[in-house]
Amino acid sequence: MELTTFFQQLINGLQLGAIYALIALGYTMVYGIIRLINFAHADFLMVGAFAVYFFASFILTLTNAIPPIILFILGLIVALVAGALIAELSNRLAYKPLRYKPRLSALITAVGVSMFLEYFFASLPFIGPSFRAFPDLLKPVSFVVGGVYLNNIQLLDIGLAIVLMILLTFIVNRTMMGKAMRAVSQDKDAAKLMGINVERTITFVFLIGGALAGAAGILMAMTYPRIYPNMGILPGLKAFVAAVLGGIGNIPGAMLGGFLLGIAEIYATSYNSLLGEGIAFAILIIVLLVRPQGLLGEKQSEKV
Amino acid sequence: MRNSRKAFVVVVLVIGLLAMVVGCAAPSTPTPTPTATASSPTPTPTTPPPGGDIIIGCVAPLTGDSATFGKSTQNGVQQALDETNAKGGLLGGRQLILKTADDKSDPTEGAAGITRLIEQDKIVAEIGTVQSKVSLAIAPILQAKKIPMVSPTSTNEKVTLVGDFIFRACFIDNFQGTVGAAFAYTNLKVTKAAALFDVGNDYTKGLAESFRDAFTLLGGTIVGFEAHPTGATDFNAQLTKLIAAGPELLYLSDYYNDVGLICKQARALGYKGYFLGGDGWDSPDLVKIGGADVEGGFFTNHFSKDDTRPEVQTFVKAYTAKYGEAPDALAALAYDAANLMLDAITRAGSTDGTAIRDALKTSNFKAVSGTIKFDANRNPIKAAVIIEIKGGQQAYKATVAP
């Protein structure tokens, strides 16, 4: 492989990895606090993407004069809010009644919520199961550095993944709400006795997790401008692998896992076109066999 | 307790076996009927010989998720019959009557529909149906009854291989790859090409392989040939590899929604050459997803309403006047299929199935989608049109013979 091709593939891998990392962050945080693998997370992403789609289409029919950067920021806010709302709605309706039931019930419910969102959206007449073209929020700009092509959306993906990871680590480790989240993750009853409002804390976790999914949704839709109700399934599964790879519950781990997985997938695909798809799941099996706690996870229970 | 459970299992197994036997027997029940009537000399004698109407059948997906395909097909056939009726009918003034059946895109519905058209309506010929899977279900019934069938749009190679009464008006999938290669090599003067296709889809795979074979045969070089899994959204790895090999043209046989993403990602990776594809590109959403990056792309198609040949312009004008919208490729092919059949009936001089079949075999008909002759497998030998994406619209570029 030539050197420019090698670096081009590295950039491709980082871009794909950034998308996985963004999704994995939300997975891992919700798991870290309430020990729930929220399979519907990838569908919150889809809801976020559709919310921005309708919002941006509406704005663009009113005016074409809006500066792209303003449109993007407004779109991002819409995505964050839509993701947070759908996540909290799922929490209220589906997960809350099962809070003190066996953990398996909530897990199965998560699969149910995921399928409900996919098929409910596909059945809505104004959404439907087919593909939609996502409007250009930012004009794609390519530039060349030493023979390697980069573009603004790639950099945005990578940059935003890193910023959100730092922000999330800060919230969890340095704020009062973060402290409450960590307490709830260790022992719900003890946290209640210490005067922590457990339900409010969990709501907060879902709001942040959903907002992260919304952010992943808008970036994924901008990178691959084709959206449909099932758009979250495959990236969601791979992001889940990324979270496990990094150590589920561990925020920097999700980030690392996402980037490693993206890069591995791209290099495997460039070696053989059909190898890439399988590589994520091969990695999952190997990680579970060799290092079940993940790369950055600690043995036993790492609390976020 | 244990015994009763065992007995229950046995009962379930017996029921299952019975269901299998009945299930296997069911499809074979219709078969005796065709052979029985086929031996009595065809359905023709039941229609009064001179002066009676000629009944033409059309099975098409009139409802369901392909309803627009079915509607276009029905309109195209109706248009052809109406024009002939206006000119005084066929075989000394006999009028043409269209009888339709809805297959709902379902092979079982299609088989039931064609049986009803044959038994109740006594059709002498069948135009249809749209999808290959349904055509494959109705073709054996028509073959057994010795009633000729022309499918307008079933592109799967197997359809006409059912028997010698089964024809089609469209080219088969792989033909598009061959025409694409000819266009790339001869018209665009390209010598180095690469292809990217969906490995999980026989259509895109077949097109890419036939493009590769034909392009190599013409003297060009295939510098890269990469697959991607179904449902992929990130094609950067494959594209980086392909672009590094320096192709002047990328052959993309995917459907429009993948092609839009692929073109965008290829341009972002600095690719400057041509894009070329097949009729899977034929959707307004191609431009919505691909934007400026699909601009200048070419694809092969059956028909273009902007083709300047007089057959095309006359048809487009008449169809638009009648239905209030321009015909799509499905309507054009249905119109061609019906006219091929009517031409064969005229030359056969009768409505006897075998005579029509023999006349169809020697067709040399100036149709809307090109002059049609049939090869040994009853597939048409005809030209394809090349469409260019220009200013976000489809523009007619050229007609290319294989």
Image: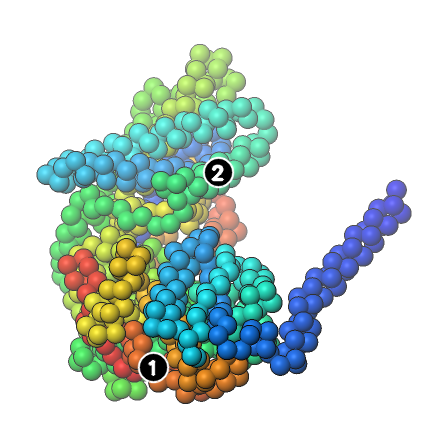
Q: Look at 39% across and 64% down and name the residue there.
A: B78
x%, y% of residue B344?
42, 81
Q: Look at 30% across and 80% down and name the residue there.
A: B366
The amino acid type of the residue labelled 1 equals Phe
Residue corresponding to mark 2: A116
Residue B365's disc number: 1
| Quarter of the rendering containing residue B110 | bottom right
Compute the Cα span from label 2 to label 1: 54 Å
Q: Split into 4 quadrants, where in the image is the C terminus of chain B?
A: bottom left
x%, y% of residue A287?
47, 50
The amino acid type of the residue labelled 2 equals Phe
Tell which subunit mark 1 falls on.
Answer: B
x%, y% of residue B362?
41, 87
User: Front-most of A258 and B83?
Assistant: B83
In the image, residue A193 above or below residue B22:
above
User: Front-most of A118 and A101?
Assistant: A118
Q: Secondary structure at mark 2?
A: helix
In the image, residue B205 above or below residue B365:
above
